Image: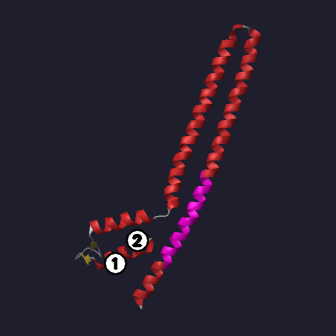
Amino acid sequence: MKIEEILVAMEDLLEDAWNLPMSGGKRVVSTSELQDLITDLRASLPEEIRQSNEILAKRDRIIMQGREEAELTVQTARAKAEKLVSQEAIYREAQQQAQEIVAQAQKSAKEMKNATVEYCDNILARTVESLSKSSQAIEETRKSIRKQKQA
């Protein structure tokens, strides 16, 4: 079913429900029917929503991988620096190299994170646009249904 059809079915379910006496307009609705419609609605959501969730998970994995690689690089740099400690001149050189490696690793991790965030932001922006269009279509359908109801 299309999203519009599901929403119409949900409205019909509410309209056909019987009123509870002295409840201030509350109605009794079949929860199983409503649950079925909600399940159908979820299945009908645009693929972009599912993709955005996958992209967010992928982004998190990439960021984590970048952090792990940066940490490994830092550990490697520290290990190299410790080996070179035996002589003072070599020690100074090792410290400088370790700092350069750490700086490069941090720079690489930051670039990877920024690229991932930008990619995810672009995908989410497209998802928002798609959802906005879907929301507008739903609202137009509801207005059309209300007009038909009034006529």
Vertical comparison of 119 with 12: above or below: above
Farthest left residue? 21
Question: Which quarter of the picture shows residue 106?
Answer: top right
Residue 82 placement, left or right of 15: right
**Total marks drawn?**
2
Prevailing secondary structure of the magenta residues: helix
- Percent x, y of residue 86: 69, 8
Mark positioned earlier in the residue sequence (2 or 1): 2
Q: Residue at x 54, y 50 (%)?
A: 55
Figure coloring: secondary structure
Residue identified by numbered label 2? 1
The amino acid sitting under disc 2 is Met
Disc 1 target residue? 12
Give how far across and how far down residue 22 sits, in percent. Answer: 23, 76
Q: Gap in Å between the C-alphas at discs 2 and 1?
A: 15 Å
Q: Position of residue 84 (x, y in %)?
A: 69, 12
Secondary structure of the residue carrying tag 2 is: loop
Highlighted magenta segment, given as a residue range? 120-140
Q: Within 10 Å of the Cα at label 2, are there few (<14), some (14-19), or many (20+) other Cα atoms?
A: few
User: Which quarter of the figure is the C terminus placed in?
Assistant: bottom left
Q: Residue placed at 56% from the left, 61% from the top? A: 127
Q: In the rendered image, which quarter contains the N terminus? A: bottom left
Q: Is residue 132 magenta?
A: yes
**Residue 82: image location, x then y, percent:** 65, 14
Q: Residues within 10 Å of mark 1 (few under 14, many from 20)?
A: few
Q: Residue furthest bottom?
A: 151
Which mark is nearer the camera, 2 or 1?
Answer: 2
Residue type, label 1: Asp
Q: Is residue 145 left or right of residue 90?
A: left
Q: Is residue 59 above or below residue 80?
A: below
Q: Quick check: 13 left or right of 5?
A: left
Check the image and report above or below for 71 versus 85. below
